[in-house]
Image: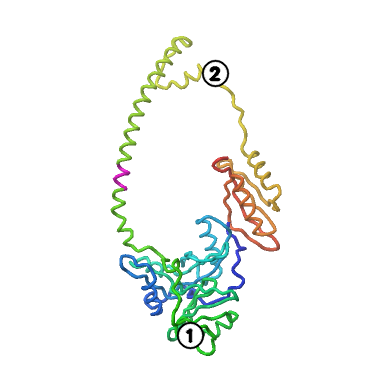
Amino acid sequence: MISQSLTLDSNASERPVGLSASNTVENRLATPSAAMLARAEEFCPKVDGLPARPVAAELVGSFIVNVPKSNARQRQALITFAVEERIAAPLHAVQIVQAPLSNAKPGDHLALVLFNNIMAEIAQADAPHLPEYLLIPRPSSDTGPVWSVWKEGSRAVVRCYDGTGFAAEAAMLPLLWQRAGKPALRSLGEPLGDALPAEDLSDAPPPPDPADAAFSFAQPRHDAARGFAAWKWAAVAVAAALMLHLGFIAFNAHALRQIAEAERRTAEQAIATVLPGMPLTREVGPILSRLTPTQAVAAEGSFLPLLSAVSRTLADAPVGFRRMSWGKTENTLVVLVQSPGLEDLQGVERDLETAGFTVRSGAATAGNGGAEVEMRIGRGAGG
């Protein structure tokens, strides 16, 4: 189900990110800050002796999103939809990657966004890549929002207190700082100037968080090559297991043939006593069925039990049904569920899944004081 009620941190300010209306972005993988290149070589883990490569902050958008508790697959989908309306690019043109976020509030996640062509170039590289603002430790403060700024020449890289980051021209930094509510500033690189009152930490800039420094957009290609020998041994083991399995199948087939012959002789004796003169063919099923009394089994429809179970589950839920249909083949109810809000729809879906049903939801819509979504409800694996 597409949730449209996800909220962002109310204290987060809007910042420019390196995304445009198209995916024709200049390749700047090799042009991050020189200071960030040095920090990557100093603090990031090396892969086969290759240092990590920082990606220019202009190419990587960052957002804090808050999503409900979910498994990894569901969380990635929720993060994707939460970011969708905040970027000026279609989802098929970008990659959305979850990054580490230390000391995060429950439900908060750091989402990184970059274009497909940038991710493709990263995947072709041998060294790990990470956004350059992850090389600046996330600032913390008990008094309010704070920015850590690494200025180098006419360019500044900023790591915000919420974990996001961006880069901007140094001349634009005072305006961005004012628009963000004048957070406290910590200068880790060159002085920021008189217009920006900052605490100077340039003599001993703090190191990045180890989890941030170890982050990489994609594993290097040679990791797969290094694992090729292991795959060969795994293939040999699979082949040996297959041969052993085929041996068991042959043994079972021989045993089953012996059982079949014994059953055939039993059937011949039964026919000779009860149905004299009736020939016995290879298809002994019809004859044995005549010799064995059958019991009638009352057939029970599946629609009413399914509808009753769903109704009991949703008896106290603040929802209504606009449309309902039933698929006999899959024993599935298709209902258009209405509720006062999207959170109620999510609660209905959780209640059904908790009760053991399988639920597939379409796109939820909201408007005119209510929300609705089409749900396909069926029995779970254990139902």
Badge 1 amino acid: Ala
Quadrant of res 10: bottom right
Asked if the stretch drawn in magenta spans residue 238, the answer is: yes
The dot on residue 170 is 1
Expressed as whole percent of the image width and height from the top left, the position of residue 41 reads 36, 73
User: Which residue is rendered at x = 38% and y = 25% of the image?
Assistant: 256
Left or right: residue 318 compared with residue 236: right
Magenta region, main secondary structure:
helix
Expressed as whole percent of the image width and height from the top left, the position of residue 190 reads 45, 85
Badge 2 amino acid: Pro
Left or right: residue 200 compared with residue 222: right
Left or right: residue 204 compared with residue 376: left
Using the image, determine if residue 300 lies above or below residue 82.
Answer: above
Say which quadrant the C terminus sits in.
Answer: top right
- Badge 2: residue crowd in 10 Å (few <14, some 14–19, many ≥20): few
- Badge 1: residue crowd in 10 Å (few <14, some 14–19, many ≥20): some
Q: From the image, tell me which residue sits under label 2.
A: 293
User: Which residue is rendered at x = 68% and y = 52% of the image?
Assistant: 322
User: Which residue is rendered at x = 59% and y = 68% of the image?
Assistant: 8
Comparing 104 with 71, the one in front is: 104
Asked if the stretch drawn in magenta spans residue 259, the answer is: no
Magenta residues, as a range?
234-239
Marks 1 and 2, how far apart at CA: 92 Å
Using the image, determine if residue 59 lies above or below residue 70.
Answer: below
Secondary structure at badge 1 equals helix
Instruction: Give the residue at the far front of this rendering.
Output: 204
The dot on residue 365 is none
Secondary structure at badge 2 equals loop
| First in residue order: circle 1 vs circle 2 | 1
Using the image, determine if residue 263 lies above or below residue 23.
Answer: above
